[in-house]
Image: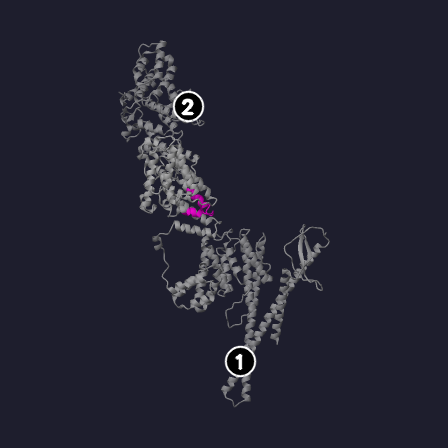
Amino acid sequence: MTTTLDDSRRQQLWELNTRAWNGEAVFPVGKLDASLKKNTAFIKKVRLSLGADQQQTILKDIQTVSLEKYLTEILAGILEGLPRCTKTADVNASVEIVSALHQRFGTKFTPYLLSSFLHGLASPPKSYVRNEKEDAGRVARQKILLRLLTEYCMVGIFRDINEAAHEDLPDFALRKVNAKVEKVEPVLLSVLKEIFSYDLKGGGTITIAVGFLKRFGSYILEDFPGEGLKESSVDGNETEPHSANGSALPDVFPQLLTLFTIYTNAITKQALVISASLNKWRMRLTKASIRTGKILEEYTTEITTLETLLLLFTIGVDYLCPLFHIPLPDLSAQVEEEEKAIITEVSSGGNQEDEMLVWENQENKDFYTKVPNLKNSIPVAVTAATRVDDELGAKMTLFLAKLEKTSTVKLLDELCYEYWYMGLNNKASRNRLVKFLEEKLRNNSATIHDLKLYARFIATNKDLLPDVTLQISDALDVNFRSQLHNGKFLVATIYMFLELIKFKILPSHVIFHKIRTLILNIQVLNNLEILGLLLSNDYCGRVLKYDADYKELTRDMIELLKTKRSLDDKLTANDLLAIDNFLLIVNPPSLAKISNQKKRKDETLEQQFIRYVITTQLGASPCSKIALIITKANMKDPKIQHTLHSVLTKPQKVSYDAVPDLAKLLSQMKKVVPCLVPKVVDTVIETIDIGLMVNEYRMNRSRLVTMKYVAELYNCNVLTWEMLLDICFHVTNFGYNGGDPGSVANKLDPRDNYFRVSMVTTVLTSLKFFNPVDKAKSGKKTGKELIGRRFEAKLRKFLIFFDYFVWCKAQPLPMDLTFALSAFYTKLVVEMPHWADLRLASGTQAGEKLMELMKNTTEDDDDDEEEELAEEEEEEEEEEEELVDEEEEDEDDEDDDVDEDDEDDDEDDEDEDDDDDDDDDMDSEEEEVLSKKRRELLELEREQRKLQEELDEGLKKLMLESMNDQAGKGSDSRVRAFRAPIPAKSVSGSNSSGMRFTLMTKNAKKQQVAKTIELSKTDKLAERFMEEENRKMEENARIRLILLQYEE
């Protein structure tokens, strides 16, 4: 029977021990025996046991034996005997014995006992190197000492740390003693703080806290559950729960409640941290295993450690949180998700909702899922027996022959049982079985049906023959790896791999390692075909896509393939097309999705035909033919006009080469539907504005096509040059307050964004600059020179501004833009030599030069406008004078007619006068046209002659400078080729049959060297030069002949 220390007895001991601290003699003693024998015997008793069996004897000795001279030895013996008090009865007996010693010796004994207790409960220092065995022993010792300390505090033996012997205290106790505080902290609270503050992340104190609350929770918590208060002692006896009513420490328990609440919150947070860390490590293991195809030991070791730690914290949280009314953290959901990610052998179960999608039919499902369970149906004595005899080899040969000829599932299942009941199982037989299967795979000698049966044989015996399963899996892994990178196609290996996936024998990390490697090396020969076998529904794609064990990772692999397709620039057009077809096969669109797609608004057949012809046939057929076909429709129908407007405002819907034809089509349609052109132009300009405001990368191609369309609209005379340049100015200035891109930051057009430069460059390189005259018919004489000067002035102003806009961008420009702008300026200078000062902006002083050009150009524009106004006024005055002269001539003619012929009728006179006037008008118009053409031809010839003279003078000047630089220099310097030969005219009077050219080169000192070479007239360079000269001569002769004919 167990002795129980009730609350009334604790109260009595509390009062006696308190009086002993005050110095009162409360322990009755008799005649004291001071003999050495008695004292030594007492020391041995307390060293061996302080349990219930020795309680009465020890108490009697305390009353009758002297003991005072041997307190040090008694203290050491008690400290040795206390850790053996693990049972409740022994603890209660130790409370009575230590109370008696305290009541008899008081401050001579108890302070030193308390100091020893503090040393035993102190945590290791920070420099302590953790050891598993030492940590376990320390925790067990702390549990016992903490329980004894609590019992001693409840009966008043220990009260606070200040009452301990100051000569020898642990560090945490010294800090408490030296701290100057008004109220001294109870020793129990100080010790618990010290214990709980150590190794919180490691969870080493969780078991201490749980054990403490199981024994003393009723004193701390008012609503402590009754079931948890029953304590199981080591000997199996249960004790009744403590009652909080007789508590001897009413002040310390509220503080303990606060301490345990803080501690519970701390371990709850740490449990969440450990769970998150475990999740990360499992995800790392998943990725690493799929990447390498192996389970990496360093990951599994860390995961095992975290799982053990999380289990410890889970036990602590599940017990402590309900006691202190703290919500339990949801660790179970995280653990379940993490367990799905860990790479292990896949389970044989699945979600019933997906089973109908996994298998094609019931027969297929039964073949892969209803496999005989040999482990439960064959006795252990049969499976465990291993026989060795001479006939076993022949039996195994016969068995393999039967296995090779097996053609039905029923015969295969019988062979599985036959293997075990014939006693064929031993190491040699297993090796022969593995060798047989590997040879079938290596030689491709098995049919697909045979491979299915072999896979079912492996699946049936996977629990009883794990080494065979492992060896076959490893062999498949090695063979599969070898063909992923060198384009092999081992049919048997691939199909056996597929069958083992269906039977769920292969680990998932092996499966998805192969799929990932195939995707990353998709351009290797046969890899896409192998991937198709893995993921298509005809083989094992259903299992991978719909089975619960595989579908998440399969979805990730398909996303990886899509990423590979979009980012890998090494894939050919055939590869991209094959991947697109493969993705369509793997993820075919559902019927519901197809039926729910948004349909185009109802259109008539005419509208659909117009849309089809323009978007698909434009560029393949002549534009005039397409326009003729379209105009046969009812152009007054608003639906037809709407369709035309929709198609003509979306140049991105046609091929890039067909954009000029689309502009020509709009130009031709303006005669049939005049209102269509302004609507289309407005919509195109609005589209440009939307692109500038949105500035989305995905719209860049459409925006470039739109700018190409704008240039072609100008080339087709749909847009005037004023509108064209206004659009270009708008593109470069959009978002810049004040119109200065160099001084204002624009979020829509950062300095390192060159897309606006590309837009304007697309327009410039697509323009036919050199027909600036507006061809709109007008009854008024416009004058080509006047319009040409206006266009050229505004164009020059824009190009200078555009050069400044380019200069404001981050330098250097991308190479494609640099080449495009250089080609444009080269073409511009060839056609307009007086524009040679325009160039691609570069250098630190380019901005100042460009602004100066802008200023000069603005002044020139003002002068040109004044000249144009003056010329317009002069033309108007000349026209008025011509009209007055014609009226006077008409009056004179009428007077002459009246005087000469009075008898003629008025009507005849008027007719004759009209005929004369018409003849005069026709003659004057012909003379005016001839004189205008003559002036144009003379001006053209004069410009060509001027250009030729400037070119000849420039070449001569370069030749003379080169020859002067070469004069006086040594002829032994090494000469290296410069860039290209510069042709020069041959010397007159030369009898040579060839043509002479001067070759400009540079020597090692970067000095120019001129060398004359002679080429045969049959040489291609000479022939090309002669043809050019002949062409110029013929053109000059033709111009002279035309002038002579006009003069005649």
**Other-residue count near label 1 (Cα within 10 Å), few / some / many at <14 / 14–19 / ≥20:** few
Whether residue 177 is in magenta: the answer is no
Task: Name the residue: 34% across, 55% down.
Answer: 595
Q: Position of residue 372 (x, y in %)?
A: 32, 38
SS under mark 2 = loop
Whether 229 is drawn above or below 560: the answer is: above
Task: Out of 362 and 627, give the one closest to the viewer.
Answer: 362
Q: Position of residue 212 (x, y in %)?
A: 33, 27
Res 48 visible: yes
Identify the image quadrant of residue 22.
top left
Q: CA distance from mark 1 to mark 2?
A: 133 Å
Res 674 visible: no
Identify the image quadrant of residue 1032.
bottom right
Which image quarter is the C terminus in?
A: bottom right
Residue picked out by circle 2: 170
Q: Position of residue 1045 (x, y in %)?
A: 61, 75
Give the numbered dot on residue 918: 1
Amino acid type shown at disc 1: Asp
Which image quarter is the N terminus in?
A: top left
Left or right of 754: which side holds 362? Answer: left
Whether residue 529 is in magenta: the answer is yes
Task: Out of 1000 and 425, give the one closest to the viewer.
Answer: 425
Task: Out of 747 and 979, give the one closest to the viewer.
Answer: 979
Identify the image quadrant of residue 466.
top left
Q: Majority secondary structure of the magenta segment?
A: helix
Left or right of 394: which side holds 955? Answer: right
Magenta residue span: 512-532
**Other-residue count near label 2 (Cα within 10 Å), few / some / many at <14 / 14–19 / ≥20:** some
| Among numbered discs 1 and 2, the one appearing first in the sequence | 2
